[in-house]
Image (spheres, rainbow, N blue to C red):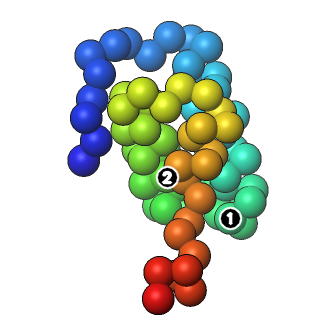
Amino acid sequence: MYFTAFEALEPRDLTTLKTVLEELRLDRGIIAPDPGLDELARDLVNLWLAGFRGSCELKAMMKPIDLHLCQ
């Protein structure tokens, strides 16, 4: 769970989130009706609420962690 701001999403914010979601979907090979896409969208909104507003920031935060780096 992220710290959440109490700000409303503006139309430009929704456009950014939709664009980032589509880019992540294509990068990960997710087909549109996949339930994983809903989870990805929720994570993006949570990151936005936590203060990550730019598309580059959002994409960087959504990159999967390379497990070999954690060993």
Q: Is residue 44 above or below residue 11?
A: below
x 63%, y 46%: residue? 59
x 60%, y 38%: residue? 57
Q: Is residue 22 above or below residue 45?
A: below
Residue 35: x and y, percent?
A: 47, 61
User: Considering only order in the chain, which callout, 2 or 1, is on the residue closer to the N terminus?
Assistant: 1
Q: Is residue 53 visible?
A: yes
State the SS at label 1: helix
**Tag 2: Cα neighbours inside 10 Å, few (<14), some, or many (≥20)?**
some
Dot 1 corresponds to which residue? Answer: 28
In front here: 4 or 27?
A: 4
In front here: 5 or 71?
A: 71
Give the CA separation, mark 1 to mark 2.
Answer: 11 Å
In front here: 7 or 19?
A: 7
Dot 2 corresponds to which residue? Answer: 40
Residue 58: x and y, percent?
A: 57, 40
x 42%, y 47%: residue? 43
x 25%, y 35%: residue? 3
